[in-house]
Amino acid sequence: MTAINQLQMSYSPEEDRVLLRLNTTSAEEFRFWLTRRYCQLMVQALSAHRATDPDVSNQVSPVARKAVEAFKQEAADSGGNFKDEFKPSDTFPLGETPVLAHKLSYRVSDSKLALTISPGSGQGVTIALDTPLNFNVTKLLKSAAQAGNWVLDWGGEKRGGEQVSENERRIIN
């Protein structure tokens, strides 16, 4: 598993995709193009991981679960560094040109999310996310999706934060 040193997500209007740049602690940089559908799959994996947090899952009401998640999001925001410029690497295992992310697989084990991002063929990268890093990745993904005016299902929220009724929820394939 690859340890993250720095991560950046930005929306590209020319590509209508999100560019994910990931630097590792071993000074390697991975670059992926994420489609809207792929971002929705990432949202589902990130949400599934957060749902296993006992601080959240042990709450009786949905309102209490949302409140605990909001508190944890604030704590993660204060611990994350969103100001430093992304520092490019000199080593690109998949090449300097971003590859299209094709396959996403994940598993939750010992309160960590192992997320594997792979192109259509060849090697991908597996990263481990703890809960605070999950919230930080979610924040970056939300920001990039909003820049593209993408409507993704964030687990009961629309872009403006208004609640979605059960009948309005979108089903993705």
Image (cartoon, rainbow, N blue to C red):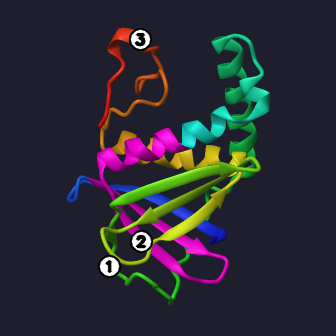
Q: Nearer the viewer, residue 76 or 35?
A: 35
Extreme residue toward the left, this view: 14
For the residues marked 3 and 2, what is the alpha-carbon distance in whole angstroms? 36 Å
Circle 1 residue: 97
Circle 2 residue: 31
Looking at the image, residue 136 sits to the left or right of residue 173; the answer is right
Residue 22 belongs to magenta span = yes
Number of the label disc, if any, that sits on residue 166: 3
The quadrant of the rendering that contains the C terminus is top left
The correct choice, above or below, for 31 with respect to 151 in the image is: below
Q: Do residues under tags 1 and 2 come within 8 Å of each other at their CB atoms?
A: yes
Position of residue 124 measured from the top left corner of the image (x, y, whole percent): 45, 72
Q: What stretch is highlighted in magenta?
A: 17-45
Looking at the rendered structure, the kind of residue marked 1 is: Thr
Q: Quarter-wise, where is residue 49 in the image?
A: top right
Residue in the image at 48% along x and 55% along y: 105
Position of residue 55 measured from the top left corner of the image (x, y, whole percent): 79, 29
